[in-house]
Amino acid sequence: MSYAFDEEDGRLFVALNPQIAEAILGRRPYTRIEMAEVRALQTDPARLIHQRLCGWIDPGVLPRYHGRL
């Protein structure tokens, strides 16, 4: 995000990243990643797996797995 203020007429101009704005407005899906959890992980593979699971699991929805274990 960036902004500029015009002191002559008092107008404020705000520029937003279009992808972030679409996610905020609910037009684009996003993934919530808890940074405290990421910082607690010790290895890059663990962080990558955590990132993928955060994108796969929808918080607040009963998880369903249709594959074979």
Image (cartoon, rainbow, N blue to C red):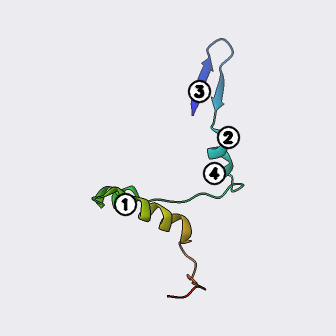
Residue under numbered circle 4: 24
Label 1 close to label 2 by CB (< 8 Å): no
Alpha-carbon neighbours of circle 1 within 10 Å: few (<14), some, or many (≥20)?
few
Which marked residue is nearer to the observer: mark 1 or mark 2?
1
Name the foreground residue: 44 vs 33.
44
> For the residue marked with disc 1, what is the amino acid?
Pro
Which residue occupies 30% across, 58% down? Answer: 43
Residue under numbered circle 1: 45
Residue 4: image quadrant is top right
Residue under numbered circle 3: 3
Which residue occupies 55% across, 69% down? Answer: 56
Which residue occupies 35% across, 56% down? Answer: 44
Mark 2 lies on a secondary structure that is helix
Which marked residue is nearer to the observer: mark 3 or mark 2?
2
Where is residue 50? Give x, y as percent.
Answer: 42, 64
Badge number at residue 36: none
Which marked residue is nearer to the observer: mark 2 or mark 4?
2
Question: Which of marks 2 and 1 precedes in the sequence?
Answer: 2
Q: CA distance from mark 3 to mark 4?
A: 18 Å
Q: CA distance from mark 2 to mark 4?
A: 10 Å
Alpha-carbon neighbours of circle 3 within 10 Å: few (<14), some, or many (≥20)?
few
Label 1 close to label 3 by CB (< 8 Å): no
Residue under numbered circle 2: 18
Where is residue 9? Give x, y as percent.
Answer: 69, 15
